Image (cartoon, helix red, strand yellow):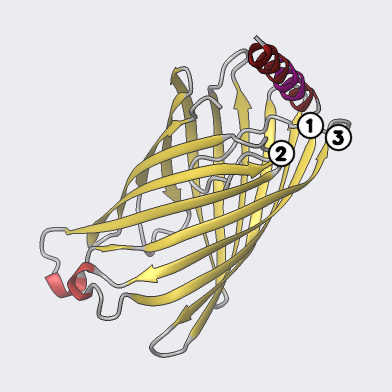
Amino acid sequence: MKTFHILVVFLLVHECVSAQEHETQPLKIHHAEPLYIDLIRDLGAHKGEKEWNVGFGLTDKLSFDEYEALVEYEFAVIDRLGIEFELPFLFYSPISGTPSEDVPPNRMESIKMGLQWSFYVSDKHQTSMALAYLNELEVSDFKNFGNPLFTGNVYNPIFIIAKRWLQNWHSLIYTGPLFEQHFKSQEWHTRYDINTSIHYTIPHSDNFVGVEFNKHFEDNHFDMVIRPQMRLGISEGLMLGIVTGIPVNREYERFSTFLRLIWEPSH
């Protein structure tokens, strides 16, 4: 009987502590997250939140088609601190008449690992800010897999600011430099990305429509792809993102499509 009483007291204390932790969770503002260049984790994420993503895309690269696929896992280890692991793959198919030597080899693009800290969340201004870092360890293509295994690394510090306007409008800026190191030649390449987006969320749902502008500067060259998009709720915790890519400069690519299946397990 004494053991039973101790067990009851333990359960009551545990429930009180859990309720207190739930009540004292830090503020989190809902921001619409872009679907192509997505965040490492929700801004202001609460401990235990997690998400699985599976993505598929097709891009017309003029002389060949590029197919992309990815598997991604996000997790908030503590309040407002999220991590991400991603495996992206690229496959290529020549367009009729293109020599095989002009088509890049199929490969797992890299092993991506990211960290994101939401350092500012303001209810008054409906604004969140975060610092993030994304590391991409580049992997050799399937033809030369393991010889060597890793060919380079991309270092990508990121700054994020998002604002909610009125009840249903959202804007976001995701920006930072990319420093790419090639291990064999020890050469470095630098690029600067500015990704901006604006979305309208459908009232009383997780659905939204919007547009994402992916811009980058490299070697005095500017390029931008406009990506109209929408997210549809399929069931509780399961959503589908649909993206179309329209390049401003068609020197390197034409239209593209991308689908992202998003699953947020309950926690």
The quarter of the image holding the C terminus is top right
Residue located beneath label 2 in the image: 44
> Which residue: 71% across, 22% down?
14
**Residues rendered magenta in the picture:** 12-19
Query: Where residue 150 sits in the image (x, y, percent)?
Result: 36, 75
Q: Residues within 10 Å of mark 1 (few under 14, many from 20)?
A: some
Q: Determine the secondary structure under disc 1.
A: loop
Q: Secondary structure at mark 2?
A: loop
Q: Toward which corner of the image does residue 192 lie, by quadrant?
A: bottom right
The residues bearing labels 1 and 2 have C-alpha atoms spaced at a distance of 7 Å
Residue 87, disc: none
**In the rendered image, which quarter contains the N terminus?**
top right
67 and 227: which is toward the camera: 67
Inspect the image, locate mark 2, and give the three-letter code of the amino acid beneath it.
Answer: Gly
The magenta stretch spans residue 58:
no
Q: Is residue 104 visible?
A: no
* Sequence-first disc among 1 and 2: 1
Task: Please tell me which residue is depicted at 67% across the width and 17% down the height of the picture.
Answer: 11
Report the residue marked by disc 1: 27
The residue at 64%/16% (across/down) is 3
Q: Quadrant of residue 263?
A: top left
Which of pointers 3 and 1 lies earlier in the amino acid sequence? 1
On the rendered structure, is 164 left or right of 54? Answer: right
Position of residue 73 relative to residue 87, above or below, is above
x, y percent for residue 23 = 79, 22
